[in-house]
Amino acid sequence: MYLKLNGVEIECTGQERWIDLLDRLPDAGAGALGVLVRGRTQSLNDGVEEYAFARTLTYADEEGRRIYERSLQFVFLTAAHRLYPGKRVRIRHSFAQGLYIDLPNVAVTGAIVAALKAEMGRIVAADLPIQRFSVSTEDARDYFTRTGQTDRLRILGYRRFSHFTLYRIDGLEDYFYGEMAPSTGCVEVFDLRTCGEGILLQMPDVNNPKKPARPAKLPHLLHTYDEAAQWHAILNCENAADLNDLVVNRRLREFIRVNEALQERRIQQIADQFVASGALLLLIAGPSSSGKTTFSHRMSIALRVQGLRPVKVSLDDYYLDRDSIPREPDGSLDLERIDTLDLDLLCDHLPRLVRGETVDVPEFDFKAGKRRAQTHPFSVEPGQPIIIEGIHGLNDQLTSTIPAHLKFKVYISPLTMLNLDDHNRIRTTDARLLRRIVRDNLFRGTPPEETMAMWASVRRGEEKYIFPFQEQADAMFNSALTYELAIMKKYAYPQLLSITEDSPCYTMARRLVKFLNYIQSADVEDEIPVNSILREFIGGCCFYKDED
């Protein structure tokens, strides 16, 4: 039989695994972590397929990085099991190109981290196989019972399949959704260090995978994650099993009310900070599907409660004509670059508005891709707050003519919600993608595959234009709602299941389906407030209704 791997036609017997074919490639499959076959991610240990058009996945690929992270995480858990058997380990969230890990009831010290790092080094050097095998749900339940993994037992009860896939390193067995590298030697680049009260498992640098990413000091972000942990404690909801219990036991409605009240309190706290600062410009920025528009409306109301009358300046009015925007090397237009805006005009208008002057604001015709001939006059009263929402809100280029003391910056993102269990986290980026899939389909008629196809480009724009400025924010707002996956599943799940194996988006769709398989769907939309962040994505938001 014949197949093509990385464009190289290879003859094989049909008994080989993908890993057996790597030495037949010109570069011997350098850095291979998995294989992409007809839109599906496969393990290097999987059998080859006749006439398959496949390519290896490396750390340069999103799926490759996920395989690396998953495998390195398993190496860490193996080291922790060897040194501290029976101790609970929680993979909490991503942080600065790494994973933030918690050891409950253990005071993390430099000595503990050094011992774990050394043990991980020994496991990597031994190049132990990472074995995948399937067991019955009953056998998995027995194993989790024997090993005291109560979080796995509970989530297993909500899984509707009769089999369960586990991975094994040197006798330690664990569950992860997604593929693994073939052996521990594939994840030799890492670092381990203390971070707050926990541990930071540092991944390779995306731009230089041969070295661990340099640690970044992100105190605002770390504080926001700590705040999210406090919210989970208040809500008494730590993982997907906790959420499912609320759905099954018909206690989700009260949970929604408390969750929304926590967000409302945080919005009012930020409004208080803004007023106390004496600033006049409220700048709001965050990545796609963060709920920026709804948040800006709610901030406006919170400021009205303070006796202020904020107004909004739309950056859409300040776009340059499309034909005057420099093109990328490949000829495409990057419409998220800050120089797609008329910065000179904006920086002229803002200080004049602050002084109470009237300016002539342009009007942009998105269908024509250029400004209309007419303008409209705009002014604010002295001391009247101005709200500006957009991806560049935290970049001082946007407001270079306004003194720093007159600016108050807010970074918004659904930074964390729930994890499946102690060792399987649900990524913030995946949660945002779910939001966008649902919103784009409901309100823009965009098929899920089209949304997913442009997601990589959206993510690149966020990495360039948003995340580098997040620590410059005066306040951060976590727009995640702990209950939202139970609502979003009903909208997203059928769409994701309709994506077939021949689609280039199949792997992405399956990734979302795999964790949604563990989530119980809830039909309680009537309980969700009309001003909720979630309404921006499922509909019924009061801020988009015309006045009667």
Image (spheres, rainbow, N blue to C red):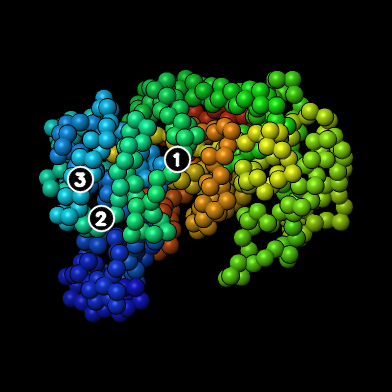
Where in the figure is residue 63, as x and y percent of width and height? Answer: 37, 56
Where in the figure is residue 49, as x and y percent of width and height? Answer: 26, 69
Task: Inspect this view and state whether residue 328 appears.
Answer: yes
> Is residue 331 shown above or below 199?
below
Q: CA distance from mark 1 to mark 3?
A: 24 Å
Q: Secondary structure at mark 1?
A: loop
Question: Label 2: which residue?
Answer: 188
Q: Residue at x 51, y 23 (%)?
A: 262
Which amino acid type is shown beneath numbered disc 1?
A: Lys
For mark 1, does the 10 Å Cα neighbourhood hold few (<14), some (14 to 19), or many (20 or more) residues? few
Say which quadrant the N terminus sits in: bottom left
Q: Which mark is residue 118?
A: 3
Is 291 on the left-hand or right-hand side of 373?
Answer: left
Q: CA distance from mark 3 to mark 2?
A: 12 Å
Q: Nearer the viewer, mark 1 or mark 2?
A: 1
Say which quadrant the C terminus sits in: top right
Q: Nearer the viewer, mark 3 or mark 2?
A: 3
> Is residue 532 shown above or below 352?
above
Question: Label 1: which residue?
Answer: 217
Q: Residue at x 79, y 28 (%)?
A: 383
> Is residue 53 shown above or below 371?
below
